[in-house]
Image (cartoon, rainbow, N blue to C red):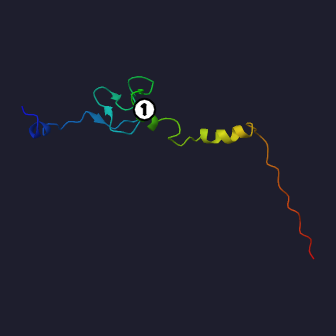
Amino acid sequence: MTKGAQSLGRRNNKTHTLSRVTGTQSWHKQKKRCASSGHGAGTKLRRYNWAKKAIRRRSQGTGRMSYLKHVQRRAKNGFREGTKAQSVKRKAVAPK
């Protein structure tokens, strides 16, 4: 069989489908494993040091950071809790 157009026409079955974890087309249907995150193979996230850019894409600071974005401000104030801001009372202007 040749290597060109005739071979490419025979590729009509899908090995990968949508992953529940990453949302990408990388869930291998037979292996039951996500090629992107490694979900299904174990508990740890798939991560290699030879793929620095891939680590950068999914590292801390790329998402919403719904908890972490407030920590720096709270640390600046010493993690105080249960206090109320003092009201700034305006001086009444005396009528002339």
Q: How many marks?
A: 1
Bin the neighbour count of mark 1 within 10 Å (Cα to Cα): few under 14, some 14-19, many 20 and up: few
Circle 1 sits on which residue? 52
Q: Is residue 33 left or right of residue 3?
A: right
Residue at image coords 34%, 28% = 33
User: Which percent across, then down, holds residue 38?
Assistant: 39, 28
Q: Is residue 18 above or below residue 92?
A: above
* Residue 39 position (above or below residue 68): above
From the viewer's perspective, is 84 left or right of 16?
A: right
The residue drawn where x is 33% and y is 27% is 32
Q: Position of residue 8 (x, y in %)?
A: 14, 38
Quarter in which the C terminus is drawn? bottom right
Taking the image as shown, residue 61 lies to the left or right of residue 27, namely right
Q: Is residue 2 left or right of residue 66?
A: left
Image quarter where the N terminus lies is top left
Residue 78 falls in image quadrant: top right
Residue farthest to the bottom, as pictured: 96
Dot 1 lies on which element? helix
Image vertical order of residue 87 relative to residue 24, above or below: below
Is residue 67 visible in the rendered image? The answer is no
Q: Which of the 4 image quadrants contains residue 36?
A: top left
Name the residue furthest left.
Answer: 1
Residue 30 seen in the current view: yes
Locate residue 26, reporting x and y percent. Answer: 33, 35
The answer to which image quadrant residue 46 occupies is top left
Which residue ends up furthest to the top in the rendered image? 42
**Residue visible at 17% across and 38% down in the picture:** 12
Identity of the residue drawn at 11% across and 36% down = 7
Q: Amino acid at mark 1?
A: Lys
Q: Nearer the viewer, residue 16 or 63?
A: 63
82 or 74, which is in the foreground?
Answer: 74
